[in-house]
């Protein structure tokens, strides 16, 4: 039997019953679910997952606190999702990040949802260079398209 830290790329670990982690999925599924959550911010969107009132209560940001696991301050909402306000200019994101590099976030202002799920898990605190580059590129493309409209 293996002890922590497990090798998350090992088939034995991937088959384990571990409800607090080990959410094996793909980026498309993560993005689809997060998009339903994001659309709940609208009072008129027929595809919303919950009411706007419920969304507003759940996604109220709390004060940032130092997180020893990642080595810097993090902000969370009332239901525990991340509230990311640094690293991408003036953009604010809500979402989740996994220790292996996976990420799913959405922006209320730009009305976009982004997800990344890696093929190889590398144990790290939050996201990685790949996710940062991809997010910056998505934001650049969204801004470029809005200018053309």
Image (cartoon, rainbow, N blue to C red):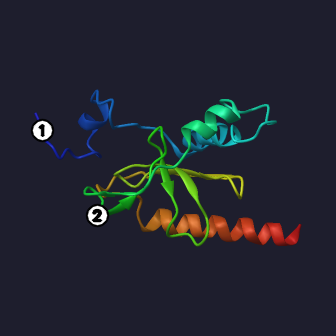
Residue 111 % position (x, y): 71, 53
Of badges 1 and 2, the one in the foreground is 2
Give the residue at the far front of this rendering.
63
Snapshot quadrant of residue 10: top left
Considering only order in the chain, which callout, 2 or 1, is on the residue closer to the N terminus? 1
At numbered mark 2, what does the secondary structure look like: helix, strand or loop?
Answer: loop
Q: Residue at x 44, y 41 (%)?
A: 80
At numbered mark 1, what does the secondary structure look like: helix, strand or loop?
Answer: loop
- Left or right of 53? Residue 23 is left
Q: Which residue is mark 1?
A: 2
Question: Looking at the rendered structure, which numbered label has been put on residue 20?
Answer: none
Snapshot quadrant of residue 90: bottom right
- Left or right of 59? Residue 70 is left
Above or below, 135 relative to 21 = below
Callout 1 crowding tier (Cα within 10 Å): few <14, some 14–19, many ≥20: few
Label 1 to label 2, Cα distance in Å?
A: 27 Å
Q: Nearer the viewer, residue 149 or 53?
A: 53
Q: Quadrant of the C terminus?
A: bottom right
Q: Residue at x 41, y 57 (%)?
A: 64
Pointers 1 and 2 in contact (CB under 8 A)?
A: no
Give the residue at the far top of this rendering.
17
Q: Residue at x 69, y 35 (%)?
A: 52
Above or below, 117 relative to 141 = above
Q: Which residue is mark 2?
A: 71
Q: Nearer the viewer, residue 89 or 147?
A: 89
Above or below, 99 relative to 25 = below
Residue 142 % position (x, y): 73, 65
Residue 146 % position (x, y): 81, 67
């Amino acid at each position: 039997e293996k002890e922590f830290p497990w090798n998350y790329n090992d088939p034995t670990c991937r088959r384990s019953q571990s409800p607090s982690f080990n959410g094996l999925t793909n980026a498309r599924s993560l993005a689809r679910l997060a998009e339903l959550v994001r659309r709940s911010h609208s009072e008129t969107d027929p595809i919303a997952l919950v009411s706007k009132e419920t969304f507003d209560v759940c996604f109220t940001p709390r004060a940032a606190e130092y997180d020893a696991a990642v080595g810097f301050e993090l902000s969370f909402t009332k239901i525990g999702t991340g509230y990311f306000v640094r690293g991408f200019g003036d953009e604010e994101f809500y979402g989740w990040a996994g220790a292996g590099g996976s990420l799913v976030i959405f922006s209320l202002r730009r009305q976009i949802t982004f997800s990344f799920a890696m093929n190889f898990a590398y144990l790290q605190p939050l996201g990685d260079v790949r996710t940062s580059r991809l997010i910056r590129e998505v934001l650049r493309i969204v801004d470029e398209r809005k200018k053309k409209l």
